[in-house]
Amino acid sequence: MDGAAPGDAVHRGLAVGGVLGFLVPSLAGPAEAAIHPVLVLLLYATFLGIPFGRLGRAFGDRRFLVTVLAVNFALVPTVAWLVSRIVAHDQVLLVGVLFVLLTPCIDYVIVFTGLAGGDAGRLLAAAPLLMLAQMLVLPLQLWMFVGVEFARSVEFAPFVDAFVFIIALPLAAAALTQIAASRTVAGRRIEQVVMAAMVPLMVATLAVVVASQIAGVSSRLGSLLLTVPVYVLFTVVMVPIGTAAGRLARLDVPARRAIVFSGTTRNSLVILPLVLALPDAYALAPLVVVTQTLVELIVMVALVRLVPRLVPDTTSLREA
């Protein structure tokens, strides 16, 4: 996936879903039924990009690993809680915002990191650990930040089903596909075809999510717009935090740039099925997550140019 592809995919998916949802409200039901199948395919393609075979390397690079985990699971929660006070008066918005801000990205962040001259390889190697850590820590964080009443209101059976069938199974299938790709020509062809379908699958996923939700929540568009400053402020705060964390850890320049991108980029598409499994009272939450995707990808394009200036390669400057 090239650098423009994620942003273009989001724009196309949102536009197609919005137009169809408004013009043909009867599509909401079929679109909602299609969400899980397209999500399974999208996440399967996403997880194929995770180098499961490099898990040992991720453990070996301890300084980078400790820094990326500290930024995402010690510093990010504090920032997420603070900026979420903007929507704290609305629990549905708050839940959607926290779901997405508390989970670090494991997919297109690697593309943007590479475009900015960051160490995409080390971030790619750390992706399995970031995925595992967020799945383990997220329930506790939501319990702490949203409260006991929210935890009691959630039916965990659909939540568990969503995790097993929409996240765990595609994750296992991706791992098996990687094994097959390393041993057979057929496996490599399957991997190539699925990876090439990543952008169309992203378009389809966003389109069906928006088409299924937009007609019923048009009266709450003002609320959705309220989340935009939350997401922008999160990025504004996390960029200098990530820069400082990389410097304090004495990482090299490419690794420091990777830390900045990891701290600012969130896991919206992977966390989306869990948000869709929330009770009906939280029907707006999926669009809160999709809104974050749109804002983030616009911001990422800017950061590709900004981060190299904030974290300059002084070695090349001295050589010049």
Image: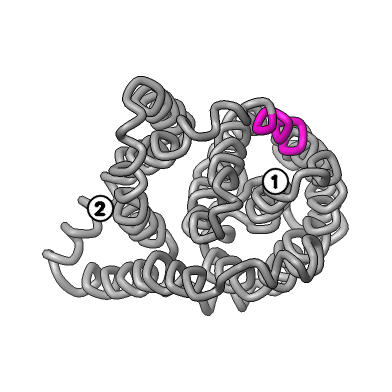
Of helix, strand and loop, which mostly describes the magenta segment? helix
Residue at the far left in the pictured view: 186
Residue 244 position (above or below residue 67) = above
Quarter residue 167 falls in: bottom left
Task: Return the residue nearer the eye: 310 or 43.
Answer: 43
Q: Is residue 207 visible?
A: yes
Residue 54 position (above or below residue 2) = below
Residue 142 drawn in magenta: no
Residue assigned mark 1: 264
Under mark 2, the amino acid is: Val
How many numbered tags mark residues here? 2
Quadrant into which the C terminus falls:
top right
Q: Position of residue 248 (x, y in %)?
A: 87, 58
Residue 230 drawn in magenta: yes
Q: Position of residue 237 (x, y in %)?
A: 83, 41
Which region is colored magenta?
223-231
Q: Residue at x 38, y 35 (%)?
A: 207
Secondary structure at numbered mark 2: helix
Q: Residues within 10 Å of mark 1 (few under 14, many from 20)?
A: many
Quadrant into which the N terminus falls:
top left
